[in-house]
Image (cartoon, rainbow, N blue to C red):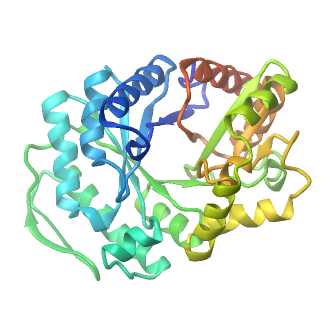
């Protein structure tokens, strides 16, 4: 199970399948099914993507709420799509209608072509300055019982009141995607949890918990009883794909994302270590997913995961699970990792 382990208070989120790859009936079935798997596995919540190609993340969140009892949708929020008042209104409306809590995954960037189509030419670091103001308004509206005002470089609101009011116990958790200095700094100012794309575990000093502030990572896991079984299943799920490699290279050329560049540079610097090493970038390099994977036996993957926990990471956003059985494998790894850290 993926619930909190002892005093570690780990929070694990799965990810909802993207709608752009499915028909309507397939997507509804998959979204509901993955949500139920995730809840049964003990996940805190489930990430819902947002970009120009996906269905509206808030409508997908309502589907997830309708299919589960306690699972929290982690809704990706991009400022170009919606005014911050509308985000706060969605949060309090879902709480009023369903008595359910959500998390918000604040996103500064996106696909370059999506932003260009929306005429958003804001430079990378300035997008985080804008996102910080945006998030501050959402937080202020949700936390204040009085009319709320804010004046910044990008947003201003005056005597704005949110109704219906949000019960304190349903205040959303705030995550902020970004591995850049600008992204981490913005998250720290707001008390949000920055979600990074992790480096190989060897790059984190042993036993160094960082500065003690909340931190999280986006990661995929494929673990089995033996190394051979894990790598067999990993390579079957993510075979080499020349078309995907070319798409990845094209995306790299037009992206200003710090995490995209960091992962691409890591892959280029580790050409002989893409197999039989727990830290695996082949799915990312073949444009099949947007995070590193940890692959191997339960023991080896748990050891690697324990390195991240020891480095201070307590929130984990997993890739889309292909089955409920995969979540059981992942639950085994988290249990072993928690035991290693406790020991």
Image height check: is 90 above or below 41? below
Image coordinates of residue 227 in percent, x first then y, are 86, 27
Q: Residue furthest right?
A: 272
**Quadrant assignment for the C terminus:** top right
Image coordinates of residue 321 in percent, x first then y, are 55, 30
Image height check: is 60 above or below 122? above
Q: Nearer the viewer, residue 301 or 6?
A: 301
In-image side of 154 versus 222 (left or right): left
Q: Residue 100's image quarter?
A: top left
- At x 39%, y 81%, the residue is 122
- At x 70%, y 61%, the residue is 263
Q: Is residue 306 visible?
A: no
Q: Nearer the viewer, residue 156 or 200?
A: 200
**Quadrant assignment for the N terminus:** top right
Image coordinates of residue 68 in percent, x first then y, are 32, 21
In-image side of 197 versus 172 (left or right): right
């Amino acid at each position: 199970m993926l619930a909190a382990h002892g005093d570690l208070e780990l929070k694990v989120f799965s990810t909802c399948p993207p709608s752009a790859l499915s028909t309507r009936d397939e997507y509804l079935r998959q979204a509901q099914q993955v949500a139920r798997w995730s809840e049964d596995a003990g996940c805190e919540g489930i990430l819902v993507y947002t970009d120009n190609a996906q269905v509206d993340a808030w409508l997908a969140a309502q589907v997830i709420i309708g299919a589960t009892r306690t699972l929290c949708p982690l809704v990706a929020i991009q400022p170009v799509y919606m005014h911050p008042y509308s985000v706060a209104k969605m949060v309090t409306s879902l709480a009023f209608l369903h008595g359910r809590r959500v998390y918000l995954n604040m996103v500064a960037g996106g696909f370059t072509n999506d932003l260009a189509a929306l005429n958003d030419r804001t430079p990378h670091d300035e997008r985080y300055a804008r996102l910080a103001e945006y998030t501050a308004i959402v937080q202020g509206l949700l936390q204040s019982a009085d009319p709320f005002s804010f004046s910044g470089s990008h947003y201003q609101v005056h005597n704005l009141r949110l109704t219906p009011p949000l019960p304190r116990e349903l205040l959303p958790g705030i995550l902020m995607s970004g591995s850049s200095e600008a992204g981490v700094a913005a998250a720290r100012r707001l008390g949000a949890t920055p979600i990074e794309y992790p480096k190989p575990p060897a790059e984190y000093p042993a036993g160094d918990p960082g500065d003690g502030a909340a931190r999280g990572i986006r990661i995929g896991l494929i673990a089995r009883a033996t190394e051979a079984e894990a790598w067999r299943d990993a390579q079957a799920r993510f075979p080499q794909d020349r078309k995907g490699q070319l798409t990845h290279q094209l995306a790299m050329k037009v992206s200003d994302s710090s995490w995209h560049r960091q992962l691409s540079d890591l892959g280029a610097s580790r050409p002989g270590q893409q197999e039989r090493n727990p830290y695996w970038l082949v799915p990312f390099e073949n444009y099949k997913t947007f995070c590193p994977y940890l692959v191997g036996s339960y023991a080896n993957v748990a050891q690697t995961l324990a390195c991240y926990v020891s480095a201070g990471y307590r929130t984990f956003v997993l890739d889309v699970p292909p089955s409920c059985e995969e979540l059981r494998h992942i639950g085994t790894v988290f249990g072993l990792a928690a035991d290693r850290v406790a020991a």
